[in-house]
Amino acid sequence: MIYTASQLETFTRNIFIKMGSTAQDAETAAKVLISADLRGVDSHGVARLSGYVRLWEKERLNATPQVKIIHETPSTAVVDGDLGAGLVVAPKAMAIAIEKARTAGSGWVAVQNSNHFGIAGYHSMMALDHDMIGFAMTNASPLVAPTFSKSKFLGTNPISVAIPAGNQPPLVIDMATTSVANGKLEVLQRKNMSMPEGWAQDENGNPTTDAAILKKGGAMLPLGSDRTHGSHKGYCLSSWVDIFSAVLSGANYGPWVPPFVAYIDPISESVGKGIGHFVGAWRVDAFRPADEFKHHMDNWIETFRKAVPVDGEEKVLIPGDPEREITAQRLKDGIDLLQPVVEDLMALGQKMGVEL
């Protein structure tokens, strides 16, 4: 079923207001979620909405967080998210990073005591309007096995960087440090489809194509899928995200990260508070004049667009191209939600007294 972005944003905002969120926080949460649907990252859009509600019902998510700085220097800060939705906490942390970058050249904010923050790209892209480079990462539920392991100690732990350009659109990198984001497995489950080999392993560490394998004790694999194809690199990237997001901020890390799904309780012990994020902003003119930089970014992008494709293959893309093209198409034609997602939203709306 097809909905406009405005319809889905209004529905999402009203759900958060029903949870007790302020109008401003509800607006922010809705914009972050719908941005994922617009950019084609369907696994992190309204399909996740009921998950946030279930966390709130379990009192694992605070709908009215008092987000505050608990430590800072001129260019850095640690923020306590007060167990709020990361959809709300991370944009506030990024706004702090941007303000610090205005005066110090760069701003870096580590976040503790938060929850799932949606797509990393939304937060990094906040810096673009200020002639800044944006950076965002977060740790996540432990669903990923380190290379050579059966233990689930890491999350999908995404990284995003957004870089402004001049006449060309910005270059936006937004990627999980696993072979694929967990949401892609969830989408395949809704479609009753198998997944490609290399995305996950069963509980004994064997390859599998079962998209529901995580519910059976399996684990996702780091980027690269196996050592031969560079999984140790994905493992290293994921470790970097976990340490910057949580060890640095005072959040939970590794196997102690609380799960996003409400039906699985966090383990009784903890090593920190909630989930952690790490965001940052660089002022371009702290390095060279912004117009000069953006001129050369245009040249870089135009040069790479002219890269000769392999015979029979598609044109060479710039990071952010697919999402930008999907956004334009979905703003024009609407967002086509899978039937299971529609049914989930309908049930959620009925329960919360909000019409879709």
Image (cartoon, rainbow, N blue to C red):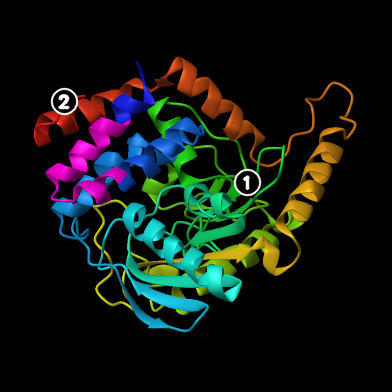
Residue receiving disc 2: 355
Prevailing secondary structure of the magenta residues: helix
Q: Residue 330 at x, y = what percent? A: 48, 22
Residue 128 or residue 32, whichever sits in front? 128
Question: What residue lies at 32% left-to-right and 41% top-to-bottom?
Answer: 30
Q: Which residue is nearer to you in this view: 239 or 328?
A: 328
Q: Is residue 278 left or right of residue 9?
A: right
Q: Amino acid at mark 2?
A: Glu
Q: Is residue 310 above or below residue 269?
A: above
Q: Is residue 201 visible?
A: yes
In magenta, the rendered stretch is 9-27
Q: Is residue 238 left or right of residue 275?
A: right
Q: Residue at x 38, y 29 (%)?
A: 190
Q: Position of residue 170 (x, y in %)?
A: 65, 43
Residue 209: x and y, percent? Answer: 54, 37
In the figure, 354 relative to 163: above or below? above
- Classify mark 2: helix, strand or loop: loop
Query: Which of the 4 image quarters holds residue 169?
Result: top right
Q: What residue did someone put label 1 on?
A: 172
Which kind of residue does numbered mark 1 sit on? Answer: Val
- C-alpha gap between disc 1 and disc 2: 34 Å
- Which quarter of the rendered picture does the C terminus lie within? top left
> What element does badge 1 sit on?
strand
> Can you give x and y, in whole percent of width and height, for residue 53 in the image?
21, 46
